[in-house]
Image (cartoon, rainbow, N blue to C red):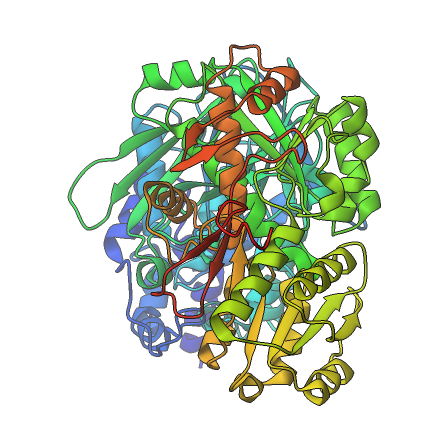
């Protein structure tokens, strides 16, 4: 009994001595060489794997724990050192806000370097290789300390979980924080919030083992758990990097998306976030430019080849990013350092323009990109509500055309920055956006703004010449007359689209009875009136009109009235995908047997199109640009390439935005800098038989249109695409 007590005492006293102190690169490398990088999980759940077998095989036996107590062997599951490190950090942590986001401001000077890591998820072997590369590059010494006081480290959250070494990587991170006070920052991610980590098998099992062997210390498990949660509670949600030379400019670093209210300020230049694989349509590189988010360059970082990333997105790289700070953020750059773990090779690097999202093959190319002036344009669309899918896609199309131009070197020595703001389909917000673009961003060119009421809200500013409106996403006839100076349209009017649809349905399908479901507002009523006029020209004087409101969510009464009318042709004049989807779900595919449904293509989002096809619903749709899913022209191929590269869904809305962006680029390429709204407007007003994207553009001062036709596409995508122009249907126009 006395002997057992002495052995237990040896373990108790010597436990800390047996713990692995991962406080130098040499110790970290020794640890990594001693344990498998990807131990096999006992289940097939990539998000919450169980490592019971691996843990059981690596937990020290009773005799090994005795050996560890006298430093004969190491014990990687002894968390006593981690507890002490956590105590030190918690004791020195500053007070965080009681509510709201915790934003940590970090002031940096020109010449500083930021070492930024994306999600690590306990992938300690990869992290140690990254630290070794930082040592080789001269940023860090063997004691995990930065050599230069102008070097900063930033972890973009989700450092733990989903792999078997979360506690060990936490120990390394704690040492980095303590060794580099005020220079190493750990941002709170999803895994660090709301005690989420506690429910994960990968972290639970070692915690309970630690508690069991510390049985003489009741509450050991709860103690360590509480300390980890207290530590996570000290972490910032966002790190804001600000320059000593330009304190109003900022680069934000966060685990995931930052609220638009924080981003939508002229001084915000870039956003670095952790992995966003759900928003990617390609294999990540480690540093991927996502888009311009309200004019802010939005980057996503992957940093570890975890089993999840290998399986889900084929990511096999060790990766980290060096932010090279210039005299301004515009003159700053990003360097992706990476190596493929499947190959025996050293780290490679790729260079990027921080604020413009441009990949540069060499340092000289990067220097040229950083020194190019930037010309900004704006737009106002809906990112949310029932119109959000169309608005988001429209904004993506605008950006896609502009990013393609930037990647090709820009236009006339300039790079173009799109600033697309959200108006939630509200006219008052659209007007506020127009004013904000003008006053805060200095933008006086608004491209492809969405919605009749929204565009009309700032029409006084357009007429006064304070801003110009290029290719607004509306076919409203009231915006197409000689008084609409400083506005140009490439799409034809709703009147023309409606007439083309009616003509086609009557000529090709011999339909003589019609029902119209229309939006009862400034958009839908003029469309309905145009439909009536078109029918009268064909000698049809009776029809059924069924209104709905834009805010309507239930369409049961509407569907009853449609079925009761029983017309051969159903004109659906919706303006967004959410209401048309709700309407069609209730109406059902059977209704269209022997009937013809038709409407404007922009009401059908990609998701709604797939829904209709899966249920055998096919409609006749009009397009103001070619149908991207049935046309194959050089312009459509260029558009498709741009959409694929930036992960943008190919649909009619993004093609409209792309057309608008491409036309703007065309104008800028034919005028001399400095670019002005007057020069741009003059270019479009003087177009005559101008070749663009396979079309001949002619500016019509009476309608302010460029003369593109209406495309009417039959349900069979292989069928001929019909173009309707005044010259084609002289008897009907």
Q: Nearer the viewer, residue 366 or 95?
A: 366
Residue 163 on image: x %, y %: 39, 63
Point 37% across, 53% down: residue: 631
Give the number of callouts: 0
Point 43% across, 52% down: residue: 280
Q: In screen coordinates, is 157 left or right of 22?
A: right
Q: Name above or below for residue 515 compared with residue 234.
A: below
| Quarter of the N terminus within the rendering | bottom left
Residue 162 on image: x %, y %: 43, 64
Q: Nearer the viewer, residue 292 or 307?
A: 292
In this rendering, does residue 268 appear at all? yes
Q: Name above or below for residue 405 compared with residue 289.
A: above
In which quarter of the view is residue 380 placed? top right
Q: Nearer the viewer, residue 690 or 345?
A: 690
In this rendering, does residue 75 appear at all? no
Point 47% across, 26% down: residue: 666
Q: Nearer the viewer, residue 416 or 326?
A: 416
Q: In screen coordinates, is 124 left or right of 544?
A: left
Residue 498 on image: x %, y %: 63, 58
In which quarter of the view is residue 177 placed? top right
Residue 598 on image: x %, y %: 57, 69
Point 31% across, 67% down: residue: 64
Q: Name above or below for residue 463 compared with residue 156.
A: above
């Amino acid at each position: 009994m006395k002997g057992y007590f002495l052995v237990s005492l040896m373990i108790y006293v010597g436990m800390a001595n047996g713990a692995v102190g991962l406080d130098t690169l040499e110790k970290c490398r020794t640890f990594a060489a001693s344990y498998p990088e990807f131990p096999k999980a006992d289940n097939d759940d990539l998000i919450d794997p169980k490592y019971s077998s691996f843990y059981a095989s690596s937990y020290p036996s009773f005799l090994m724990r005795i050996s560890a107590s006298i430093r004969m062997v190491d014990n990687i599951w002894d968390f006593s050192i981690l507890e002490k490190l956590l105590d030190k950090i918690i004791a020195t942590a500053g007070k965080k806000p009681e509510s709201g986001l915790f934003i940590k401001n970090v002031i940096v000077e020109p010449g500083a370097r930021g070492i930024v890591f994306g999600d690590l998820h306990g992938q300690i072997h990869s992290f140690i290789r990254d630290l070794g590369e930082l040592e080789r590059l001269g940023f860090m010494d063997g004691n995990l300390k930065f050599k230069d006081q102008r070097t900063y480290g930033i972890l973009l959250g989700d450092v733990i979980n989903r792999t078997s070494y979360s506690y060990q990587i936490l120990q390394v991170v704690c040492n980095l924080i303590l060794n580099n006070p005020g220079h190493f920052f750990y941002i709170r991610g999803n895994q660090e919030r709301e005690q989420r980590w506690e429910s994960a098998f990968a972290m639970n099992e070692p915690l309970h083992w630690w508690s069991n062997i510390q049985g003489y210390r009741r509450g050991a498990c709860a103690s360590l758990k509480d300390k980890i949660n207290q530590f996570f509670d000290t972490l910032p949600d966002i790190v804001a990097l600000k320059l000593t030379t330009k304190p109003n400019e900022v680069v934000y670093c966060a685990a995931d998306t930052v609220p638009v209210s924080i981003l939508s300020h002229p001084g915000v230049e870039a956003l670095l976030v952790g992995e966003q694989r759900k928003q990617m349509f390609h294999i990540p590189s480690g540093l991927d430019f996502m888009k311009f988010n309200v004019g802010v360059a939005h980057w996503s970082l992957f940093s570890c080849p975890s089993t999840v990333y290998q399986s889900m997105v084929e990511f096999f790289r060790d990766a980290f990013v060096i932010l090279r700070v210039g005299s301004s953020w515009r003159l700053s750059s990003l360097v992706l350092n990476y190596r493929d773990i499947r190959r025996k090779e050293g780290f490679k690097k790729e260079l990027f323009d921080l604020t413009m999202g441009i990949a540069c093959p060499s340092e000289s190319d990067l220097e040229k990109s950083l020194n190019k002036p930037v010309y900004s344009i704006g737009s106002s669309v809906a990112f949310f509500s029932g119109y959000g899918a169309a608005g988001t896609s429209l904004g993506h199309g605008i950006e896609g055309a502009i990013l393609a131009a930037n990647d090709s070197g820009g236009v006339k020595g300039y790079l173009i920055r799109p600033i697309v703001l959200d108006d939630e389909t509200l006219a008052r917000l659209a007007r506020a956006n127009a004013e904000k673009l003008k006053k805060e961003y200095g933008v006086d060119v608004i491209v492809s703004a969405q919605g009749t009421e929204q565009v009309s809200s700032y029409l006084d500013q357009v007429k006064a010449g304070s801003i110009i409106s290029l290719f607004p996403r509306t076919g409203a006839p009231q915006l197409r007359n000689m008084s609409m100076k400083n506005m140009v349209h490439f799409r034809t009017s709703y009147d023309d689209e409606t007439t083309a649809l009616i003509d086609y349905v009557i000529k090709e399908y011999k339909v003589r009875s019609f029902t119209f479901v229309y939006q009862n507002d400034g958009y839908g009523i003029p469309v309905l009136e145009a439909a009536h006029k078109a029918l009268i020209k064909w000698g049809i004087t009776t029809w059924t009109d069924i209104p709905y409101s834009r805010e309507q969510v239930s369409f049961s009464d509407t569907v009853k009235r449609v079925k009761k009318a029983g017309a051969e042709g159903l004109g659906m004049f919706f303006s967004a995908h959410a209401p048309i989807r709700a309407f069609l779900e209730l109406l059902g595919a059977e209704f269209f047997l022997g009937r013809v449904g038709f409407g404007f293509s922009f009401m059908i989002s990609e998701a709604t199109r797939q829904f209709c096809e899966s249920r055998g619903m096919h409609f006749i749709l009009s397009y103001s640009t070619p149908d991207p899913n049935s046309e194959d022209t050089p312009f459509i191929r260029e558009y498709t390439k741009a959409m694929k590269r930036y992960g943008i869904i190919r649909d009619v809305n993004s093609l409209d935005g792309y057309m608008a962006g491409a036309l703007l680029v065309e104008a800028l390429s034919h005028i001399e800098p400095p670019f002005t709204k007057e020069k741009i407007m003059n270019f479009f007003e003087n177009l005559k038989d101008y070749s663009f994207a396979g079309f001949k553009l002619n500016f019509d001062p009476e309608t302010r249109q460029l003369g593109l036709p209406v495309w009417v596409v039959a349900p069979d995508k292989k069928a001929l695409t019909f173009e309707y122009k005044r010259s084609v249907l002289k008897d009907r126009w």
